Image: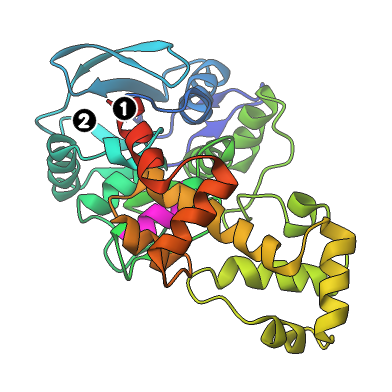
């Protein structure tokens, strides 16, 4: 497509009489309103700043005609899922909540059909999970909101999941959600309209620090744990990477060239808990996400979090969260239903 040109007043004018790009959003009940707004609002602002319709937005739901509620309760009017590609240029699927509610065969089929027609398919927040379920991300690098990363890895072993803010390929787009869509859509608008125009759109939202695709989704380990000691940071980062196969205290101490006693003292002084308690807390937090978001059996969750004994896992979980793993899962099922 030809790139639009700005006249002396800074208003984009069409190059070659391009028609508006039609951008669709398939909304899954419980989608995150902020992620959705961060994706669709830049297109609206682009139209306003250009003084013409660069983009036409459409919103789809599973019902023939109705409304889809976000996690906040705000409802968006929707039309039926598209049967044909029509003029659709790009379609994003937006999902939030829990992956246990994302078994949507009708939507998976629509995504596959649109992809066959050459429509660019995107996923926002939990949306990439549905793209993977539709078979659209095999052997492709993609991302998903960090909260769903564990469930995604368990559901799609061998997938090329990254922890970046977004991944933009010519025919596939995946984004971690939150405010990251502002960065991704900036890139899309810049690709069509030029960097100067895209910068005006970002400035419209006071979005002056545009993140790169490869930037991380989460704050650094130092910020999340309020730790700045280099050895302790290395230990905590290793704990997060070795959840399924925890390292011994001795192995961890050798990794950072400390004695076991010095390591124990360092963790307790900086974190207020023992080495074992810190490690277990990280593993149990991961277990909680898997119980809420994946269909794994409790025994498999225990194994995925480094517990060889299910009874020990259950006791540890109850001590940490006040309920058994089975109760956690039942509560999640009731909430989703």
Residue 334 circle label: 1
Q: Are marks 2 and 1 in contact (CB under 8 Å)?
A: no
Question: Can you give x and y, in whole percent of width and height, for residue 115 in the image?
Answer: 19, 47
Q: Residue 262 sits in which quadrant?
A: bottom right
Disc count in the image? 2
- Residue at x-position 46% and y-position 17%: 52
Is residue 148 positioned above or below 23 on the image?
below
Q: Most prominent secondary structure in the magenta stretch?
A: helix
Q: Is residue 157 above or below residue 250?
A: above
Q: Provide residue 183's location: percent of width, then percent of height.
A: 58, 41
* Relative side of 234 to 91, left or right: right
Q: Nearer the viewer, residue 238 or 193?
A: 238
Specify which label sits upstream in the sequence, 2 or 1. 2
Magenta highlight range = 148-154
51 on left or right of 63: right
Q: Secondary structure at mark 2?
A: loop
Residue under the point 44% across and 21% down: 71
Let me know if residue 324 is in the magenta part.
no
Considering only vertical position in the picture, is 221 above or below 44?
below
Tell which residue pokes out farthest to the left in this image. 83
Disc on res. 87: 2
Nearer to us: label 2 or label 1: 1
Which of 221/79 is in front? 221
Location of residue 206 in the rendering, given as x and y in whole percent from the top left corner: 72, 26
Residue 18, by quadrant, is top left
């Amino acid at each position: 497509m030809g790139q639009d040109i700005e006249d002396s007043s800074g208003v984009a004018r069409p190059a070659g009489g391009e028609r508006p790009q039609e951008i669709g959003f398939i909304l899954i009940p419980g989608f995150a309103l902020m992620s959705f707004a961060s994706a669709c609002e830049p297109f609206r602002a682009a139209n306003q700043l250009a003084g013409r319709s660069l983009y036409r937005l459409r919103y789809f739901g599973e019902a023939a005609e109705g409304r889809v509620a976000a996690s906040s309760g705000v409802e968006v009017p929707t039309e039926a899922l598209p049967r044909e590609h029509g003029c659709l240029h790009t379609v994003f699927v937006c999902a939030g909540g829990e992956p246990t509610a994302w078994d949507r065969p009708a939507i998976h089929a629509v995504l596959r059909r649109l992809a066959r027609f050459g429509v660019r398919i995107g996923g926002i927040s939990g949306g990439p999970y549905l793209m993977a379920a539709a078979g659209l991300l095999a052997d492709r690098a993609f991302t998903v909101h960090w909260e769903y990363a564990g469930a995604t890895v368990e559901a799609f072993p061998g997938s090329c999941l990254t922890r970046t803010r977004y991944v933009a390929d010519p025919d596939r787009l995946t984004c971690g959600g939150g405010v990251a869509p502002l960065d991704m859509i900036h890139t899309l608008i810049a690709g069509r309209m030029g960097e100067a125009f895209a910068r005006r759109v970002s400035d419209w939202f006071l979005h002056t620090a545009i993140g790169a695709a490869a930037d991380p989704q989460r704050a650094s380990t130092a910020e999340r744990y309020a730790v700045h000691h280099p050895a302790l940071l290395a230990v905590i980062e290793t704990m997060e990477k070795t959840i399924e196969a925890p390292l011994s205290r001795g192995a961890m101490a050798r990794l950072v060239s400390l004695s076991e006693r010095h390591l124990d003292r360092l963790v307790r002084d900086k974190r207020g808990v023992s080495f074992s308690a810190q490690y277990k807390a990280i593993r149990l937090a991961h277990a909680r996400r898997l119980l809420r978001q994946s269909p794994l059996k409790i025994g498999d969750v225990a194994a995925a979090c480094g517990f060889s004994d299910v009874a020990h896992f259950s006791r540890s979980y109850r001590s940490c969260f006040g309920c058994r793993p089975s109760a956690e899962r039942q509560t999640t099922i009731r909430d989703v239903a």
